[in-house]
Image: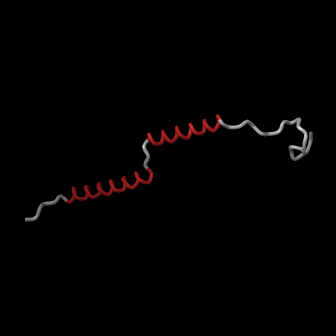
Amino acid sequence: MAEIVNLKRVRKDKARRERDCDAAANRLLFGRTKAQKAADKDAKERERRTMDERKLESTRRPEHSEGPPAGPKGHR
């Protein structure tokens, strides 16, 4: 004899498997945990601070230096 199957249950199980498959694909494409995002943010901030600390002072010439005019108008 054949086994009695609840078609409603079969449909729901199939839909659940499809949703799980779609969710797994989206996790691979877009998913990052909150901890991963925070770690990347911290690393970026730490790198920015390090670069700011090592930044050289401005290399612009002082206003009273001799040489060609600094601006487009050429006034001193």
Residue 38, placed above or below residue 17: above
**Displayed quadrant of residue 47:** top right
What is the quadrant of the C terminus in the image? top right
**Residue 2 x, y percent position in the rendering:** 10, 64
Residue drawn at the location 80% of the way across and 39% of the way down:
60
25 left or right of 45 in image: left
**Residue 37 x, y percent position in the rendering:** 48, 42
Q: Residue furthest left?
A: 1
**Residue 21 x, y percent position in the rendering:** 34, 56
Residue drawn at the location 91% of the way across and 39% of the way down:
66
**Residue 34 x, y percent position in the rendering:** 44, 41
Please tell me which residue lies in front, 57 or 38. Answer: 57
39 left or right of 15 in image: right
Residue drawn at the location 27% of the way across and 58% of the way down:
14
What is the quadrant of the N terminus in the image? bottom left
6 left or right of 41 in image: left
Please tell me which residue lies in front, 57 or 7. Answer: 57
Please tell me which residue lies in front, 26 or 36. Answer: 36
